[in-house]
Image (tube, grey):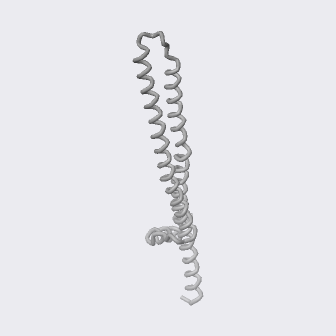
């Protein structure tokens, strides 16, 4: 085989390997982006828990304010409702603390995923050689367009 034909074949194989590498990187990036979207959705849902806990506090406080002093069980009901208000307020504080922790953890995961995307885009993360060879072979044989 003449030397020019070998160079041409080598150039074709190099181009196919580069294309295969880009395909594998794109797959990895898409996987990370999917995870990133899931984390962002999770992060956006967290405030709903606070609203729910705040609603519980408001309902408990309203029930306490509407107790009838003429009711023979007023003292018992008042005590139960005051305990319920305190419990709801404690739940609200616990939810706020949990959300703060979850927000921090989720944001760290988002930052890590974003860095992962950058690593793949810049070529800092390397594709698996076996996957690359397999995909390049399929591309060369025309099994994948």
Residue at 52% across, 17% down? 66
Placement of 4 over or under 59, stated as above or below: below
Q: How many marks?
A: 0
**Front residue of this view, candidates 94 and 80:** 80
**Front residue of this view, candidates 86 and 22:** 86
Rendered location of residue 104, percent (x, y): 50, 52
Residue at 49% across, 71% down? 126
Placement of 3 over or under 118, stated as above or below: below
**Front residue of this view, candidates 86 and 106:** 86
Residue at 59% across, 82% down? 8
User: For residue 79, which quarter of the picture?
Assistant: top left
Placement of 107 over or under 90, stated as above or below: below
Give the farthest residue toward the bottom.
3
Give the quadrant of the C terminus: bottom right
Rendered location of residue 90, percent (x, y): 45, 36
Rendered location of residue 57, percent (x, y): 50, 30
**Front residue of this view, candidates 1 and 115:** 115
User: For residue 9, which quarter of the picture?
Assistant: bottom right
Placement of 71 over or under 15, stated as above or below: above
Rendered location of residue 35, percent (x, y): 51, 53
């Amino acid at each position: 085989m003449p030397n020019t034909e070998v160079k041409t074949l080598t150039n074709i194989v190099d181009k196919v390997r580069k294309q295969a590498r880009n395909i594998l990187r794109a797959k990895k990036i898409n996987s990370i982006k999917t995870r990133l979207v899931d984390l962002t959705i999770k992060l956006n849902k967290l405030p709903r828990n606070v609203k729910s806990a705040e609603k519980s506090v408001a309902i408990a406080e309203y029930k306490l304010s509407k107790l009838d002093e003429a009711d023979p069980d007023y003292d018992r009901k008042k005590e139960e409702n005051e305990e319920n208000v305190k419990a709801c307020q404690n739940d609200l504080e616990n939810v706020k603390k949990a959300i703060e922790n979850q927000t921090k953890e989720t944001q760290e995961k988002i930052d890590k995923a974003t860095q992962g995307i950058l690593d793949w885009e810049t070529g800092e993360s390397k594709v698996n050689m076996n996957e690359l060879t397999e995909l390049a072979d399929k591309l060369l044989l025309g099994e994948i367009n």
